[in-house]
Image: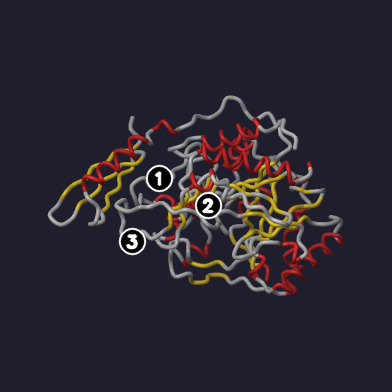
Amino acid sequence: MKLFDFKIEKFNTYKILRLKFFGISFRTKLHNKIDVNIADKNLQDFLYSSDDKDFVKITDKPYDNCNDIKPIAFYLPQFHTIPLNNRYIERGFTEWTNVTKTQPQFFGHYQPHLPIDVGFYDLSTDKVMYRQIELAKMYGIYGFCFHYYWFSGGKRLLETPIFNYLNNKELDFPFALCWANESWAKQWDGGNKEVMMEQKFSYDDCDRFFYDILPFLRDERYIKIKNKPLLIIYNPKLFKDEETTFLVKRLRRLAEENGLGDLYIMGAKVFGNKDSTVYGMDASVEFYPNEHQDLKEVDLTGKIINKKFMSRVFDMNDAIRNKKFMPEVEYPLYKTVFPYWDNSPRKAFKGGWVFQSTPELYKEWLTDVIYWTKKNHSKDEQFFFINAWNEWAEGAHLEPDRKFGYAFLQATKEVLSETGKIKL
C-alpha cells in the first residue's frame, strides 16, 4: 500500500494540491509561481521514491552492550497539558498540537512526523516510560537527560513526568537533568514570543535550585561522570558572567556539604557560549543544530508549496560528508548528534531550520563522533549526546515514526556494535 498519494487540480487562477500522507488528507493552495508540470514531477520523484522502502522494522537482536561509549538522549517532557499553556496558548496544548497540524511546505519536505510503537502518548502518567526504556535499551541508549524547567523563586513547569520517573524505581534506566534555564515564552506556534514565565537570576535561587534537584542527584540511577552527578545548564549566557560563575561555585559547595562530593557541570554551546570552563564548569556540550556554521543551503527554487514558508533548509549531505559538525576545539567538549531536524512546525513557517537527514547520513556522523570521543575522552568520560529522544515538533526523535520506522535506532545500535572493539 502506498504511504503517500497526491493530486493537482487546475483552476482558472490557481492550483490546488491534494496530498494524502499515511492515510491523512491535506489540501493546500499552490504557490502561483510553481509550474504545474514541474510540481507534478517533483511530487512523483518525492512521493514514490520515498515510499515504504525507507521503513525499518523493529530489531530481533537487542544491543549486546559491547562498547564503552555511552550515548545519552535528551528527553522532552512537554507531552501533557499544563495550566500555563492552557491559559496562554490554547486549552489542551501539548507538543503533539504542533506535530499534527503540520503540512509539507516544499516538494520533498517530509512532514508530518507521526509516531508508531509509542504512539501519541500522555506523560502525565509514567505508563509509556516503560516502553520508552525498553526501546532505548534494545538499541544501546545509555540514559535520558530530561529538560528540567525551573524558574525564579522555585517555580516549575512540565515537572510531572520527571517526578513520576524519580518516584518509580521500576523505571530502571540512568538519567540526568539539563536545567532549561530560559524564560517560558509563547513561541511554540510562531507567536509573538510573549513571556509567560520569566527567568531571572537571584543569589538566593542558587540554594533553592540545588535543594530542589537534590533528590534527583541522590538517586541511584542518576548519571555520574568521574563519580560526580552530571548537571547541564542549557544557557550559561542568560545570566551575567559573574552570576553564572557564582552559581557554579555555590552548587559545588552545596554538593560537598550534602555528601555528594562534587558535581560534573556542563554548559551547552548555545547563543555564543563556547568554553564553559570560564564559569568554573567542567566542560561544554554541543547542542546541535545550535551554533552551526558555514552550512550549505538547499536551493528550493520552484519547489515551495506555501509562499509563507521562510525557514532555512540546509544540506545535510554536505554538512556530514565534509565534517562540518566536527570542528576541533581547545576546551573540554562532549559531542552531540541529531537524527533529523525540522522545527518549522513550531515556528509557523518563519525562522525555522530544516535538516532533512537519512539513517545513512546519521550513521556516518555518529561514527565520526564515536571515534572522536574515544580519542579525546578517558574511559570514565566516554559519553556523547543525541538530540533527541522525543523532540517530535522539531523532527528530532529516535522514537520510531511511520516513514523510517526504527531506522535511526537501528543505525545507533549498528554503529555502537561496529565500533565496540576499537581502542584509540
**What x and y, as percent, mark residue 55?**
45, 32
| Viewer-nearest residue: 237 or 143 | 237
Query: Which residue is at 79% across, 56% downward?
Result: 263
- Say which quadrant the C terminus sits in: top right
Q: Secondary structure at mark 1?
A: loop
> Image quadrant of residue 272?
bottom right
Q: Is residue 289 left or right of residue 424?
A: left
Q: Nearer the viewer, mark 1 or mark 2?
A: 1
**What x and y, as percent, mark residue 117?**
50, 36
Task: Say what amino acid the circle numbered 3 marks.
Answer: Lys
Query: Which residue is at 67% across, 54% downward?
Result: 285
Residue carrying label 3: 308
Spatial CA distance of label 3 from label 1 is: 17 Å
- Image marks 3 and 2: residues in contact by CB distance under 8 Å: no
User: Is 144 situated above or below 423?
Assistant: below
| Residue that extends furthest to the left in the rendered view of this protein | 12
- Say which quadrant the N terminus sits in: top left
Q: Earlier in the sequence, mark 3 or mark 1?
A: 1
Q: Label 2: few (<14), some or many (≥20) within 10 Å?
A: many
Residue carrying label 2: 79
Task: Say what amino acid the circle numbered 2 marks.
Answer: Phe
Q: Is residue 36 left or right of residue 71?
A: left
Spatial CA distance of label 3 from label 2 is: 28 Å
> Image quadrant of residue 214?
bottom right
